Image: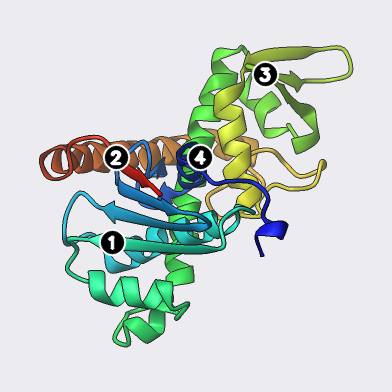
Amino acid sequence: MSQHRPRRIDREAVRERLDRVTDPELDRSIVDLDYVEEIEIDGERVEVSLTLPTAWCSPAFAWMMVADARDALFAHPAIAEATVRLRDHMHADEINEGVNSDEPFESAFGDADGDIEEVRRTLDGKARLARQYRAVSTLLDGGLTSEQIVGLTRGDVAIGGDLATVRIDDTLSVCVEADPIRRYLEKATETGVVDAPDDGLFRTPEGGAIPLAEFETVHRRGRLARTNMSSQGHVCERLGDARIGGPTRVTTD
C-alpha cells in the first residue's frame, strides 16, 4: 500500500488540511480558533483530537466539524487511516463513534430535529451572505456604484496575487484587495450559487439576482449576518481562552 502513498505525512500537512475546516457557525478555521488540541502521526495513520469552546456546543455543529476534519485528512494521499476525536463534549461518545464509523448523524441522534444537511445549507447561506457583505464593501470602497455592482458577472472578476481585477465595461477595469473577493467566491462556488462565467456575481440571501432597488436591503442583511457571526465569535473566543488555552500538541512516531 505504501507504494501508492509515496509522500510522508507531517505536521504541516495535517495542519494545512485541518485549516480548510471551518466552525460552521462562525465561518472560521478550526486551526485559527485553536480547536485542534492534539495531532498524533504514526506512519500513514493520523489521529486528531478537537476541543470546542464549551461542552454544550450544538451536537450538529460539533458533528460537522469532526466529520469535515476526518474527510479533509482522508483527502491527503499520504494518509491511509484517519481518526478524529472530540474531547470534553456532552455528546462526545455519540459523535466520535458515529463519525469514525461512517454512520449518518440521524443514526447517532435518533431524536434529532431536522436534517443535518439542511442545517449545513442554512449556515453556509449565512456565511456566504457575510462574505458577500465584505466583498461588496471592498468594491464600494474601490469606487464602484451599486448599479455597477449588481451588473457584475463571475467572468468579470480575475484574481492574481493580492489584487482582484474587476471589469466594469469594455474600456474600464478597477483593482481591489483580492482576499474579500476570493473568500466570497470560495463560498459562493461551494454553495452552488455562483459557478458559470455568466452567473451574476452577487446574489440575494435566497440565491436570486439582486434588483438594483433592493441593493441596500441585501447589503444590510449581509452586514447583519457578519455582525452576528462576529459577535458569536467573540463569545466563543472568550470561552475558548478559558477552556482550551496553550498550543496544539503534536507527537510523531
Quarter the N terminus occupies: bottom right
What whole-number distance in Å separates the C-alpha atoms at marks 2 and 1? Answer: 14 Å
Residue 201 image position (x, y, % from top left): 69, 38
Asked if 90 appears above or below 12 in the picture, the reply is below
Crowd class of label 3 (few under 14; some 14 to 19; many from 20; radius 10 Å): few
**Secondary structure beneath disc 2?**
loop
Residue beneath label 3, please?
161
Element type at marker 1? strand
Q: Nearer the viewer, residue 171 or 4?
A: 4
At x 24%, y 53%, the residue is 51
Q: What residue is pinned by disc 1?
A: 86
Q: Earlier in the sequence, mark 3 or mark 4?
A: 4
Residue identified by numbered label 4: 16
Please state which amino acid type lies under the numbered disc 3.
Gly
Mark 1 and mark 3: span between their CA atoms?
36 Å
Q: Position of residue 21 (x, y in %)?
A: 46, 49
Residues under labels 1 and 4: Cα distance? 19 Å
At which x and y percent is residue 238? 15, 37
Q: Amino acid at mark 1?
A: Leu
- Mark seen at residue 248: 2
Residue 125: numbered disc: none
Kindly report the distance in space between the C-alpha atoms of the residues bearing marks 2 and 3.
30 Å
